[in-house]
Image: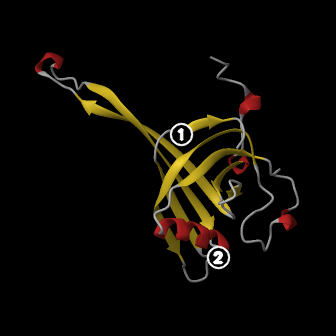
Amino acid sequence: MSAIRNNSDIIKGGHLMVFVQDASSNYQPIGFATSHTLSKTLNTQQISTKDHGDSAAVLPQNLSWEITTENLYSLNGYKALNNAFKDMKEVTVYFGESTYAQNQAETGIVGVDGATDWAPTGFGESGKAYITSLQVTAAAGDNATFSATFTGNGTLDASTAA
């Protein structure tokens, strides 16, 4: 096991991105993201018996995972996810480090539906998933946003670059 405490290992949230593989097997970033969340769960089976007394007992059963993403609404970004959602299409998703530098001039991505400057690099995790939730919020006076939930279908594998 490597050292758990090392300040140089700390990564800012803006350096982690979610990418979805396109028809050409290239990873495309979900543009204008404001946050991403990767959740992993060990599902268990209850096996409590009289022998366990007042304590619950469980056995590990399987692993599940889910990625959620919050984004400013861009027409192309939303349409791509909406098409996969309505077609109930399995997608390959990658969550991990990206090449875009925080101090790079933002003019390279402003006005672009989908941040083409981003690319997966370094450590990440990828797997097959279905988009199981897609929600758009359009409040008066605010930017429109959308959120999507990717529910894993199989393993989430470690990757050193996508």
Specify whether 57 is left or right of 23.
left
Disc on the earlier residue, 2 or 1: 2
- Residue at point 64% right, 76% down? 75
Q: Which residue is mark 2?
A: 75
- Residue at point 59% right, 73% down? 79
Give the percent coordinates (x, y) of residue 126.
60, 43
The amino acid type of the residue labelled 2 equals: Leu
Determine whether the residue tagged by mark 1 lies in a helix, strand or loop. Answer: loop
Q: Nearer the viewer, residue 54 or 23?
A: 23
Tell me which corner region of the image, top left, top right, bottom left or bottom right, holds residue 53.
top left
The disc at residue 156 is 1
Give the percent coordinates (x, y) of residue 37.
55, 49
Q: Nearer the viewer, mark 2 or mark 1?
A: 1
Residue 130 visible somewhere in the drawing = yes
- Which of the image's four quarters has the C terminus? top right
Give the percent coordinates (x, y) of residue 121.
75, 42
Q: Residue furthest left?
A: 50
- Determine whether 115 is above or below 103 in the image: below
Q: Nearer the viewer, residue 155 or 136?
A: 155
**Local crowd size for mark 2, using a 10 Å CA cut-off: few (<14), some (14–19), many (≥20):** few
The amino acid type of the residue labelled 1 equals: Leu
